[in-house]
Image (cartoon, helix red, strand yellow):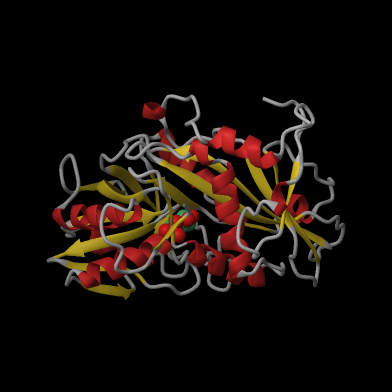
Amino acid sequence: MWAYSFVVPFVAGKGGLSSNALQAVSPFRPDAAVSDICSSETTELADIDWDSLGFAYVPTDYMYTMKCARGGIFSKGELQRFGNIELNPSAGVLNYGQGLFEGLKAYRKEDGNILLFRPEENALRMKIGAERMCMPSPTVEQFVEAVKATVLANKRWVPPPGKGSLYIRPLLIGTGAVLGVAPAPEYTFLIYVSPVGNYFKEGVAPINLIVEHELHRATPGGTGGVKTIGNYAAVLKAQSIAKAKGYSDVLYLDCVHKKYLEEVSSCNIFVVKDNVISTPAIKGTILPGITRKSVIDVARSQGFQVEERLVVVDELLDADEVFCTGTAVVVSPVGSITYKGKRVSYEEGGFGAVSQQLYTALTRLQMGLTEDKMNWTVGLN
Ligand SMILES: Cc1ncc(COP(=O)(O)O)c(C=O)c1O
């Protein structure tokens, strides 16, 4: 392992890791092209215990960065050794929270191919969020090419089939210095990756949620519908209290009427009653989840009726099944929900029939185990 970082120039949007883009050399192996180093590092799996992956940060080999001035456009990015970044203490992201993130996954297939799941959807969501947060954003093509380059450079960290996935974390942050409240003069798009297993400590066992009716994560007209970093700082208090009491996470209500379901801290929520699947409609205060959208499409293609509408908290009381969706959580069955001291339990010990069917259909598609009729997966090899 080298002590110093080196930089691999990479022009996003020009077709991935070209040999031209890999001319930089390691300071410790000046005779070795980075392409050699990348390929020797990526042919073998990383030496970690693949059976004990959770959802915790594991440092990997490379990260991708690309900078842009306020009012400008992103043009040239580069892969570099994964490591700390330097920031001016007055950076917009540190002082005023001007930042967005994304999350997507890469899966390794039995044949060695690596699949991304709908990366252009993450790119589009980042574009929409960037507009709300007054930031320039990479184009969809730049985003997708940068994701591909970062995954390929860290290929040895993509878990073996069935052991998990490589979680890909694109960031868009205001890195230029500002003092008064204003958009930062410079922005950085950065991607790092980490191998992950299950998000909840329960694994694929049902999770236990508590409905929060005092603290809110979003307000109408606010930023709840974009993936800005501040939305996550805002949920830490309710989430910490819930976890200390033994719950897996918090289910939020709308802040106006305090009676309509919104979402969980990091995933969307679905309620099943008499084989009809309902989920809160997208109206600016919840994140338009890519897994949510995919599950809705999969469910409809399997003949289910799916309603996107206002879902009243009381509907939880007589639901047949409740489940959550998200890139990190995939499809997670909910075992119980506690609301104002009253606990409602659902399927004992596992998935309900509907959520099991959707989980299986979605994960088989994501892992390349079934024909991708939706054209959602993007292969890297
Ligand atoms: C607040 C919130 N809701 C929902 C989701 C699910 O979105 P996706 O399915 O795109 O991962 C996430 C995760 O990204 C999230 O952070």
The one nearer the camera, 276 or 339, is 276
Asked if residue 83 is positioned above or below residue 21 in the image, the reply reads: above
Position of 149 with respect to 121 (left or right) is right
> Front-most of 354 and 68?
68
Instruction: Say left or right for 129 vs 366.
Output: right
Residue 228 visible from this viewpoint: no
Ligand 1 shows up in the quarter that is bottom left
Q: Quadrant of the N terminus?
A: top right
Instruction: Indicate whether 84 appears above or below 374.
Output: above
240 sits to left or right of 84: left
Q: Position of residue 337 (x, y in %)?
A: 28, 49
Could you say where residue 84 lies in the image, as x and y percent from the top left? 72, 37
| Residue at (81% x, 60% y) in the render | 186
Q: Taking 171 as reference, is 36 above or below it?
A: above
Q: How many marks?
A: 0
Q: Name the quadrant containing residue 26.
A: top right
Q: Is residue 359 visible?
A: yes
Position of 327 relative to 154 (above/below):
below
Identify which residue is drawn at 43% across, 63% down.
Answer: 289
Q: Which residue is depicted at the point 56% across and 61% down?
A: 144
Instruction: Pinpoint residue 263: horizontal percent, then vertical percent.
Output: 40, 59
Residue at image x 58%, y 38%? Answer: 39
Residue 16: image location, x then y, percent: 61, 57
View extreme (front): residue: 31
Query: In the image, is 11 to the left or to the right of 308?
Result: right
Q: Could you say which quadrant of the image residue 248 lies in?
A: top left
